[in-house]
Structure formats: C-alpha cells, structure tokens
Image: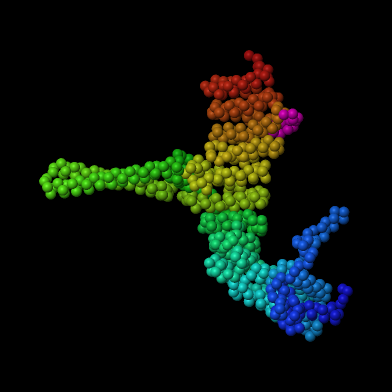
C-alpha cells in the first residue's frame, strides 16, 4: 500500500473517524462534538445542540438528480463494462466509505490488524472497528448493510488462525478475534429479539446477514423465539392496535422473521410449525391494510423447505394432509415456485418416488393387482361393482331429479293433509253447535268422512316419507363389494383425492423436468396400469356420477403418456395404449392425442420403429381383442404411417427407396397379414373388414410387386367378402377388386 498501517497520521485519522461515527450512533459521548452535526447509522443527521432538530435526513449531492439509480455503461469496441452506482445521501456515503476503508485495511494488513497487542494503537481501534461492523448490519441504508456485511465476512475469514486455515480436519478452529468481543457485539442485536414490538425490517435484515456469517453461534432457542414472535402476528387486532409499524408493514415484518429460519442451523424440527403458521397468517392477511395481493410468506417458506427437503416431503406426503386441500394446495404452489428447485430435485429422487406411489396410488394399483389375480369374469356392471371404483350412481343428475320429485311429492301431500285437518276442525265446530241445538245426522256423517280423509292423508304422507328416507339411505350408504369381488378395498373419495394429488405433483415435476418420466420406470409402469384399468374406464363412462374435481383423470394420464412417448419413441406399445381413450365417448376433448399419434407415426418414428408398429398391429389383429380397438389402430396408426411412407401419391416427395420399404414392410410382414386375413377374415366385424379392405387397396396401389406371390390368397379373401350381406363391405370389396384388376393381369380361367 501507499501508507503502512503503522503510519501515525493514518491511525490518528481512523481513530477520529471511529470516534465520530460512534458518537453519531450513541455508543459514546464527547462534549467537543456537541455543536457538530453527525450522521447516524440510519442516515439521519443529529446533534447535541439545542438549536438543531434531530432525526433530519441529510441532503443529497446535486448530482443525485441524474444518478437516482445505478446503471451500466458498455463499450462494444473493447467489450468494456462500467457500473456507475447511484448517488447516495452524503451522510450515507460517508458511512459506506468508512466501512470500505476498514475493509481495505483488514484485507491489506490482516496479520498486523489481528495480531496487534491490545495496548497498541491498532489493538485499541480493533474492537471499535468490529463493533461498527455489527452496528451497521442493522442500519437502514441497504448500501451500508452490504458494505458492513462484506467487511465482516472478510474479517471473519481472515481472522481464522493461519495454522487452522491450512489444515483440513485439524479439530476446532481458533479465531484471532476474541470470542468475548463477538458476543459483546451480538448481544445488542439479540436483546431486541426478546420483544416482538422491537422488531424492525432493518433489524431482521441485519440478523439474516449475521446468521449467514455466524450461523454456528446460534442454537435452536433462537428459532423457538422467532416462532413465538410469528404467532403474535396471527392476531392482527392486537398487532394493529399496538401501532408499532406503519400500516401494511406488519406482514413484511412477519415475512422477514420467516426468512431467518432458512439460515438457522439444524432447524428441521420447525417444518410442521412453520407450515401451520403460514396457513394461519394467510388466513388473517386480508385484515392487514393495505392488503397484500400475494402472500409474502411463501417465498421464505420455500427457502426454508429447500434446506430441509426430507422433513418437508415427509410432512406433506401424509394421507391426511394430501387429502386436505389446505395443505395440498400449499404444497403444490411451493413446488411450482422458481426458487423450489432443490425441493423438486429431492421429490424426484428414488425415496420420494416410492413414497409418492405408496401414498397416492396404493389403493387403485392394489385393485388392479387383485383383478389380475382374480378369475372373476367381467360381467354386467352393478351399483356394487361401480362403488368399488369410487362411482356413486346417486350423484348423477337423474338420481338427484328422482329425489327432487319425491321431495315435491312430500310437500304436496303435506299441504293436502293440512287442508283436510282444517276441514275436520271446521266440521267439529259445526257439530258442537248443532248438538247444542238439535241432533244433526248429516253433520255427524260429514265429520266422520273428514276424519277418515285425514287418516288417509297421514298414511300417504308417511308412506312417501318412508320412500324418501329409503332413497336417501341408498344414496348415502357406502356400498360394500361383494364377497366374491376381488376389490375388497374399494376406491373411496379419499383414495380418489390422493390419486388426484399424486397426478398434480407428478405434473409439476414433469413441467420442470422433461426427463422425469423416462427416468422413473416405476411411475410410468404404474400410470400405464391405471390407463388400462377397468376403474379408469368406468369412471370415464360414468362422468356425471363422479365429482367434477376428478373428471380430468383420463386427461392427465393421456398427457403423461404422450409426454413419455415423446421422450421414448422406441416404446411403440404406448401408441396402442393411447388408442383406448377413443373406445368410449367423453365430454373431454382428446383431439390432441389423435394429433400426437398422427404426427408420431408420420414424422417421428424411424423405419425400424414403423416396422414394429406393423408387427404390433398384426399381433393385435390375430388376438381376441375387440374389433373396435383393431379398427382404431388402423385408422390412427397404420393409415397415417403408410400415407407418410407413400406420400409421393399426394405430394411432390421423392418415392421411398426399396430399402426403406423392405424395412417398414418386409416380406414376412406382408405374408403374416395375408395369412391372418385368410384365416380370421370371416369373423371380423363389417366395420373392421372395410378398414382392412382399405389397407389392401393402399398396398395394391403402392407396393404391387411385393403382393404378386399373394394374388391368389388375396382374390380369394376379397371374393368371399363380395358374397357378404353387408352392403358396406360389398362396396369396399368391389373397390378393391377394381384395384386388383388394374394392377394385375386377370388370372386365366
């Protein structure tokens, strides 16, 4: 440096500078400075003189008119970059410059600064410098806080003894700053934490910096005290009545307290308390005016949970919490936040994946396994069987209308009964009047008839009420599975909610990591089971009898499978799985699945993968599967794939090479197709037969040479179709015969 640290003028200047800022901060007093205006740590001008009014902001330099914010100058000629800071008030700039001067002193002369004896000039100013750094941590100007934090970080780092810094694992590190000095400087900050009314944003911001630098100096009692202060803010009436903070700053103070928990060491035990406190604080947030539009507590909570991912996942992945929207909605929002990457990464780990499957999908997967192990055939669906899959038929509009009709009938009969009772009362009074004068037989007869009418009306009303009660009991009764049913543990509303929450969690993980599904085969396997399951199929068929919240089950699974297929195009079985969604009508738009299938088989799959699609289709065609599934496979997979292969028929593309055709449609595949048609063609549904004839027509038009040796079998199959009674198949049969005659010579008689 230009000046050695032992220079007396430099030491004298630093001593006076320290004295001036210490007097301004109220640490010491000196009558010689009574008429001098000083600037305290918060940037306020103050003086002991009676002529000067304290707590007055010092004016800024005139250049601050132009330098209200920092900006960056860049020069592309030499790729230079200059950051011009904003102009600070003169008093704040003096404080920042003082802190930067001491930082340069500590950096330039660490050994002289830390090793100087207590009786020397350097040793005399050292505790005052350290005290200044800690005081400035809780000051109001953010520039002073940043400067003091940077200086204190260097002091703590350079203050470690040289032997300890050079030896790894050498035991407890010793520090050249006395422990008593650090404790003395920390104590004033901690004293303010005893009472929640003394908490300020500056104090809490400084404490966060302090925790970042000296976290090991604090224990869990600090966390317990902070949690106690947070509970105070769940009582807004008391907080507002105290009038300690500016209206609207109360939630900010609570959020600043929240922010400290992410810096506390070994604070995993506060997960449950902080989550519940967050829920309570958000519930009373509108009572603080002006009200925050967005909760200020979730960002600090997510920072804390990122440091304690294991405890956080264990807390939220509990059945009773995932089934409670109060917790599940909060957890999903925290997972979606940009700063929650560590929590999402932990949730994507093997341990959390297994936990998620066990908690959210254990019941539906257990039902699927029991169905596979059971020999019970799929019969006609009943209320009992539907209830096993979480379907309550009494939730449907038709059932609700039936109950409404019974309720209206009860009201009508009750009104009718009231009228009859009034008639009976009038006749009773008339009979009393008549009996006092003379006996009137007609009045007696009318009275008896009225009483019988009342009795009949009562019986009708009671019968209708019993019918209504019976219907209600049927609607609310939890139908248990039959003894022979494989699903001894049926889907309940709780199980449906857990499954729904599991879908939403996986959806968030996939949205931030496209490789999630390909890297978790157990999740993909479970979702494919759910997609093929009888329960999903029934719930889609009986949408009106399901709560609207769970109508998106098939939609979410379809999106999962399409996402997986995009990452794993080699797994062509997924394409055939996706076709299942078109086997039944639905109020949900699944056109994106159809478009995905068309784009995949046309543009994404390689020649070898297209060959796998054809082989998979032939396997399906020869199986006992439904003809509707086979028809959809032709329409949505085989036709688009062949059109893309023979696209020169509609577009100006070069024709496919012989090698490409042999890869997609080898001779063995053509032979297997013709054999299946000749063997099982007569048993196919007319609609499937028409689609197969369309397939033959496409092949005849584009690869006639590969069909030459199969001409006899093909014409035999087509000729049998022409004998069919179905006009649709006959039409396609004549069309294919025409194509056959056009491409081949007519065989001799």
In this picture, is 302 found above or below 157?
A: above
Residue 314, x across and y down, in percent: 58, 60
Residue farthest toward the left in the current orientation of the protein: 438
Could you tell me if residue 507 is visible in this image? yes
In this picture, is 234 found above or below 661?
A: below
Q: Pick the residue in front: 139 or 376.
A: 139
In this picture, is 633 found above or below 320?
A: above
Q: Residue at x 63, y 14 (%)?
A: 749
Residue farthest toward the right in the current orientation of the protein: 2
Residue 657 falls inside the magenta stretch: yes
Q: Which residues are magenta?
A: 651-666
Report the side of 122 relative to 497 (left or right). Answer: right
Residue 514, x across and y down, in percent: 67, 49
Report the side of 157 relative to 307 (left or right). Answer: right
Q: Pick the residue in front: 136 or 107.
A: 136
Could you tell me if residue 622 is visible in this image? no
Report the side of 71 relative to 745 (left or right). Answer: right
Q: Residue at x 63, y 37 (%)?
A: 595
Residue farthest toward the front in the current orientation of the protein: 51
Q: Pick the residue in front: 703 or 29.
A: 29
Q: Residue at x 15, y 41 (%)?
A: 442
């Amino acid at each position: 440096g230009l000046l050695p640290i032992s220079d007396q003028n430099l030491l004298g200047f630093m001593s006076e500078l320290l004295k001036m800022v210490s007097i301004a901060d109220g640490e010491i007093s000196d009558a010689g400075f009574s008429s001098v205006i000083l600037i305290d740590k918060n940037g306020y001008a103050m003086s002991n003189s009676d002529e000067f009014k304290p707590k007055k902001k010092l004016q800024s330099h005139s250049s601050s008119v132009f330098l209200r914010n920092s900006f960056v100058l860049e020069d592309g000629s030499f790729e230079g970059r200059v950051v011009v800071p904003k102009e600070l008030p003169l008093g704040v700039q003096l404080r920042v410059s003082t802190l930067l001067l001491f930082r340069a002193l500590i950096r330039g002369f660490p050994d002289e600064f830390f090793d100087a004896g207590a009786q020397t000039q350097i040793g005399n100013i050292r505790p005052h410098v350290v005290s200044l750094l800690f005081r400035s941590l809780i000051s109001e100007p953010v520039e002073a806080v940043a400067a003091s934090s940077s200086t204190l970080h260097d002091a703590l780092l350079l203050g470690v003894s040289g032997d300890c810094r050079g030896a790894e694992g050498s035991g407890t590190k010793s520090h050249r700053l006395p422990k008593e000095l650090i404790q003395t400087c920390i104590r004033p900050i901690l004293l303010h934490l005893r009472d929640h009314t003394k908490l300020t944003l500056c104090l809490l911001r400084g404490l966060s910096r302090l925790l970042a630098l000296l976290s090991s100096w604090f224990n869990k009692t600090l966390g317990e005290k902070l949690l106690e202060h947070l509970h105070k803010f769940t009582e807004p009436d008391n907080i507002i009545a105290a009038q300690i903070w500016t209206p609207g700053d109360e939630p900010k103070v609570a959020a600043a307290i929240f922010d400290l928990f992410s810096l506390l060491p070994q604070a995993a035990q506060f997960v449950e308390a902080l989550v519940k406190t967050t829920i309570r604080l958000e519930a009373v947030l509108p009572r603080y005016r002006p009200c925050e539009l967005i909760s200020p507590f979730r960002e600090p909570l997510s920072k804390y949970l990122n440091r304690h991912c294991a405890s956080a996942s264990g807390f939220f992945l509990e059945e009773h919490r995932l089934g409670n929207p109060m917790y599940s909605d909060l957890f999903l929002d925290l997972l979606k936040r940009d700063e929650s990457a560590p929590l999402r990464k932990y949730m994507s780990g093997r341990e959390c994946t297994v936990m998620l499957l066990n908690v959210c999908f254990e019941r539906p997967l257990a039902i699927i396994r029991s169905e596979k192990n059971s020999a019970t055939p799929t019969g006609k669906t009943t209320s009992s069987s539907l209830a096993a899959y979480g379907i309550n038929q009494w939730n449907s509009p038709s059932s609700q209308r039936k109950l409404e009709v019974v309720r209206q009938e009860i009201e009508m009969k009750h009104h009718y009964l009231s009228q009859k009772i009034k008639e009976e009362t009038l006749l009773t009074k008339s009979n009393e009047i008549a009996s006092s004068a003379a006996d009137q037989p007609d009045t007696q007869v009318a009275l008896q008839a009225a009483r019988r009418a009342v009795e009949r009306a009562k019986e009708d009303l009671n019968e209708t009420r019993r019918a209504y009660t019976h219907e209600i009991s049927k609607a609310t009764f939890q139908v248990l599975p039959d003894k022979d049913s494989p699903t001894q543990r049926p889907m309940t509303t709780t199980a449906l909610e857990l499954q729904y929450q599991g879908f939403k969690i996986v959806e968030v993980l996939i949205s931030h990591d496209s490789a999630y599904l390909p890297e978790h085969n157990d999740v993909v396997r479970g979702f494919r089971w759910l997609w093929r399951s009888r329960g999903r199929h029934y719930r889609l068929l009986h949408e009106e009898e399901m709560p609207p919240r769970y109508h998106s089950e098939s939609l979410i699974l379809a999106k999962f499978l399409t996402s997986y297929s995009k990452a794993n195009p080699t797994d062509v079985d997924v394409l055939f799985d996706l076709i299942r969604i078109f086997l039944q009508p639905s109020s949900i738009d699944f056109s994106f699945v159809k478009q995905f299938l068309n784009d995949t088989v046309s543009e994404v799959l390689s020649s070898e993968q297209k060959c796998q699609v054809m082989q998979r289709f032939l396997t399906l065609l020869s199986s006992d599967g439904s003809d509707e599934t086979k028809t959809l496979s032709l329409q949505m997979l085989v036709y688009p794939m062949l059109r893309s292969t023979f696209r020169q028929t509609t577009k100006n593309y070069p024709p496919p090479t012989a090698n490409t055709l042999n890869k997609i449609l080898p001779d063995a595949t053509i032979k297997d197709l013709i054999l299946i048609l000749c063997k099982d063609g007569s048993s196919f549904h007319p609609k499937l037969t028409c689609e197969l004839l369309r397939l033959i027509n496409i092949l005849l038009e584009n690869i006639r040479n590969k069909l030459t040796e199969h001409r006899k079998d093909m014409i035999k199959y087509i000729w049998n179709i022409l004998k069919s009674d179905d006009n649709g198949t006959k039409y396609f049969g004549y069309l294919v015969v025409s194509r056959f005659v056009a491409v081949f010579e007519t065989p001799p008689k």
